[in-house]
């Protein structure tokens, strides 16, 4: 009788350990894919190319006037779109690039500037 109980406890312990093992494998895989996703997302060729340019503020301003000022105001002061003044303080370069090219926050359209144009735009956004 006592033996059976002990046996059952041992079995339960085995199952518990097995489940804990599975759980940590799952957590590990999830973390790994998150890391990989972040790494790939931040190192896509386009972003890397944009960041390899110095960026020309005057050209960036011209691009901004044509494409962005309608919604964000002439000096990024805001209109339909939010003010972009000081935007580079709460968004990183990579986040700013994503904001421009992703089209994930309608009504802001998705833009596809060349890497050089994007670099110019980025250098202008940093001055706001
Ligand atoms: C049709 C209007 C429109 C145009 C054109 C537009 N935007 Fe926007 N933009 C928005 C709106 C609306 C948001 C807010 C989106 C949200 O977060 O819901 C936004 C958000 C942003 C943000 C994030 C602001 C923050 O505080 O995080 C940045 C940066 C930005 N726009 C840059 C640009 C640039 C650069 C261009 C030109 C290439 C541009 N936008 C063109 C409407 C526009």
Image: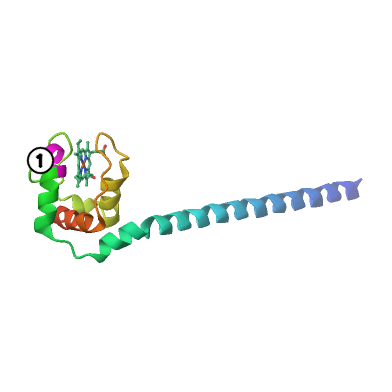
Q: Quadrant of residue 116?
A: bottom left
Q: Position of residue 28 (x, y in %)?
A: 56, 56
- Please tell me which residue is depicted at 29% across the width and 62% down the height of the picture: 49
- Number of marks in the image? 1
Q: Would residue 112 be counted in the magenta stretch?
A: no
- Please tell me which residue is depicted at 11% across the width and 58% down the height of the picture: 57
Asked if one can make out residue 85 in the rendered structure from this viewpoint, the answer is no
Asked if one can make out residue 48 in the rendered structure from this viewpoint, the answer is yes
- Please tell me whether residue 114 is drawn above or below residue 102 in the rendered image: below
Q: Main secondary structure of the magenta part?
A: helix
Q: Identify the element where label 1 is drawn.
A: loop
Q: Which residue is mark 1?
A: 73
* Position of residue 22 in the picture relative to residue 63 (left or right): right
Q: Quadrant of residue 81?
A: top left
- Please tell me whether residue 42 is drawn above or below residue 9 in the rendered image: below
> Ligand 1 is found in which quarter of the picture?
top left
Q: Would residue 68 be counted in the magenta stretch?
A: yes
| Residue furthest front in the image | 114
- Please tell me which residue is depicted at 28% across the width and 42% down the height of the picture: 110
Query: Which is nearer the eye, 22 or 80?
Result: 80
Q: Position of residue 6 (x, y in %)?
A: 84, 50
Quadrant of the rendering where the N terminus is positioned: top right
Query: Which is nearer the eye, 87 or 65?
Result: 65
**Residue numbers of the magenta segment:** 67-72
Local crowd at mark 1 within 10 Å, few (<14), some, or many (≥20)? some
* Position of residue 22 in the picture relative to residue 68 (left or right): right
* Position of residue 44 in the picture relative to residue 19 (left or right): left
Q: Position of residue 102 (x, y in %)?
A: 32, 45
Query: Which is nearer the eye, 122 or 21?
Result: 122
* Position of residue 60 in the picture relative to residue 17 (left or right): left
Query: Which is nearer the eye, 78 or 119?
Result: 119
Q: Position of residue 103 (x, y in %)?
A: 30, 41
């Amino acid at each position: 009788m006592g033996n059976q109980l002990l046996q059952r406890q041992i079995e339960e312990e085995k199952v518990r350990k097995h489940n804990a093992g599975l759980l940590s494998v799952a957590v590990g895989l999830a973390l790994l894919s998150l890391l990989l996703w972040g790494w790939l997302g931040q190192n896509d060729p386009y972003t890397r190319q944009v960041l390899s340019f110095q960026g020309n503020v005057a050209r960036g301003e011209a691009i901004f006037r044509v494409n962005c000022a309608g919604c964000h105001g002439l000096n990024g002061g805001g209109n339909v779109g939010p003010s972009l003044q000081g935007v580079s303080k709460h968004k990183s370069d990579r986040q700013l690039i994503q904001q421009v090219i992703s089209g994930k926050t309608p009504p802001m359209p998705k833009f596809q500037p060349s890497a050089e144009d994007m670099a110019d735009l980025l250098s202008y956004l940093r001055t706001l």
